[in-house]
Amino acid sequence: MAIREGKTFRYSNASIMSYASVVGKTESEGPYGDEFDEVIEDNKGGAETFEQAEGLFQQKALQRAMDKTALTADKMDLIFAGDLLNQCTGSSYGLKDFYIPFLGIFGACSTFAQGLLLAGAMVNAGYVDNAAAVTSSHFSSAERQFRFPLNYGGVRTPTAQWTATAAGAAIVAATQKPPFIRAATVGKIEDMGISDLNNMGAAMAGAAYDTILRHFRHMGTGVDSYDLIITGDLGQVGSDMLYELFKRDGIDIEKRHKDCGLLLYDREKQDVHAGGSGCGCSAAMMCGHFLKHVENGDLKRILYAATGALMSPTMVQQGGNIPGISHAVEICYK
Amino acid sequence: MAIREGKTFRYSNASIMSYASVVGKTESEGPYGDEFDEVIEDNKGGAETFEQAEGLFQQKALQRAMDKTALTADKMDLIFAGDLLNQCTGSSYGLKDFYIPFLGIFGACSTFAQGLLLAGAMVNAGYVDNAAAVTSSHFSSAERQFRFPLNYGGVRTPTAQWTATAAGAAIVAATQKPPFIRAATVGKIEDMGISDLNNMGAAMAGAAYDTILRHFRHMGTGVDSYDLIITGDLGQVGSDMLYELFKRDGIDIEKRHKDCGLLLYDREKQDVHAGGSGCGCSAAMMCGHFLKHVENGDLKRILYAATGALMSPTMVQQGGNIPGISHAVEICYK
């Protein structure tokens, strides 16, 4: 097969001017619990259902990101948003009352990187003055949609990941202040032959490997060019696979690698098995933690490679595999 | 509420260099049956399930669009694709074997316009040399996901629309030949208070009205500036509502308006109630019919305002409404 290189996009005029995160109770009890903008203790925040609550998380995250700027909804030009719920309802129902031009995206847990990449592209090219990237996931809505209803009480396997109850929102504009989005590489759909709904990290590792390697090649960079290479939610199983894939090329990525799924919870004390997952997992870690450290210069250059399992229970029941995808966004202090 | 105008994007360097459509049996028996590139008579084409068949329709549409050019998959830079199936599996499973950089989008039946708009934006800004927009819908996979399984034999209401079994693919590049994408306006999510799964045209009419009106305002145009204003799938009920909304402003849009949902089938002879719908409906009408007439100059300037009902059975069961959205793309001979 001929090599599909695609293109790495370069941006000279796209800054993340504001960002905010909203998390649930379990996430607030993890090691980064103090860093999020808002905690919704009962995971519902007054909503009647888990699905409506997930929309509320997105609404609050975007409102908080706007509140940190002089922007009000009528000054916003564009939103890119998506989530794991069927028909992306967390986004369309959660954000409809802002009445801002809206483009729905679907990248499973890679959605936040996809949103940043597209928001950056549209601002950098001058189509809009600003664009938001918003996403969410909710443990209770995801479990009943993808696995079992919570009250079924199914036992979770060791490879299973814990869907984060969290939302993140970032507003991109040409403000010429860090964090800057400097480059991005779009992922290809990779099918590693995984068909286990409880082993999605493995399904995504090959996609992350391919995208990161192409990003390095197009940018003329390598592991040492970055302070950190941050994946979305490979979890323990997927991270180990990523290290193995790079080792075959003689590359040690482990030394600079962090996985949001392994950071969000305290795996010693919190019963989350292979780590966190869900669109909200890396969105909350980026908006709660990492972007702050790029903004203040602690981190000079990071590569955020969010990963998504394009997983359909229907297709898996029909004998299909779980394809993975990963989109990479390079975020810099200068 | 302050007015949310958003921006209309202008393109000087984006042509639709190739396009193709693949339809099922019922669509091939409609008034435009001879114009589609391929008919899959049994609606499955060798696939085992309706969901897998929907993926196959997308695969064939993109392959046929590539076959009309010198492009092979390894020369393709980017795909924007989405569909109505949960987790957009028609796109991710249908297109994964091309192994082309992939961005999933979700706009329900407005997906094809969203794909054209984004593909045009990325090509026009020079991020990529080419980008495809691909989408599909399938009567049999949609009915069982959104309404009832076919073998339940439920009676359809007069306002119900018929989900098209069809896929369309367009490749955008800077080839400087018609059809040109000249401008695009992103829609806002509009909630008209409709909660009837069988009356989605009404849910989308307000969104089309808002987007078309903003497009006119930003471009300094009006109904008479266009040879045709083509909506996606408002059907009869939604089209009539659109006329009423414009009449309140003293504007007669009916004289230049066509709705793909009302064109795809022969409503006298085919039992499709209020007309066709689904992502594939307007994608097939654009790729099978309208783009040819812009390419050869019969149509000089059209406004394609695809419409989507961001409809979630879960949210409707929980008492929510069906929000609508519409994205507009201006396509010109010069």
Image (tube, coloured by chain):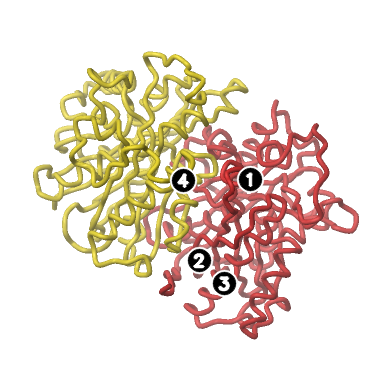
Chain colours: A red, B yellow
Residue at the disc numbered 1: A136
> In the image, which is nearer the foreground, mark 2 or mark 1?
1
> In the image, which is nearer the foreground, mark 4 or mark 1?
4
> In the image, which is nearer the foreground, mark 1 or mark 3?
3
Q: CA distance from mark 4 to mark 3?
A: 26 Å
Residue at the disc numbered 3: A212
Bin the neighbour count of mark 1 within 10 Å (Cα to Cα): few under 14, some 14-19, many 20 and up: many
Instruction: Give residue A180's position: percent from left, percent from top.
Output: 54, 67
> A258 or A333: which is nearer to us?
A258
Can see residue B204? yes
Can see residue A18? no
> In the image, which is nearer the foreground, mark 4 or mark 2?
4
Q: Can you tell which quarter of the image residue B200 is in?
A: top left
Q: Amino acid at mark 3?
A: Ile
Bin the neighbour count of mark 3 within 10 Å (Cα to Cα): few under 14, some 14-19, many 20 and up: many
Instruction: Give residue B219's position: percent from left, percent from top.
Output: 24, 43
Q: Secondary structure at mark 1?
A: strand
> A90 or A203: which is nearer to us?
A203
Chain letter of mark 3 equals A
Bin the neighbour count of mark 4 within 10 Å (Cα to Cα): few under 14, some 14-19, many 20 and up: many
Q: Amino acid at mark 2?
A: Gln
Q: Secondary structure at mark 3?
A: helix
Instruction: Give residue A76's position: percent from left, percent from top.
Output: 47, 45
Chain letter of mark 1 equals A
Q: Farthest right residue?
A: A269
* B49 shown above or below B183: above
Q: Secondary structure at mark 4?
A: helix
Residue at the disc numbered 4: B90
The reply to whether callout 4 and callout 3 are in contact (CB within 8 Å) is no
Residue at the disc numbered 2: A176
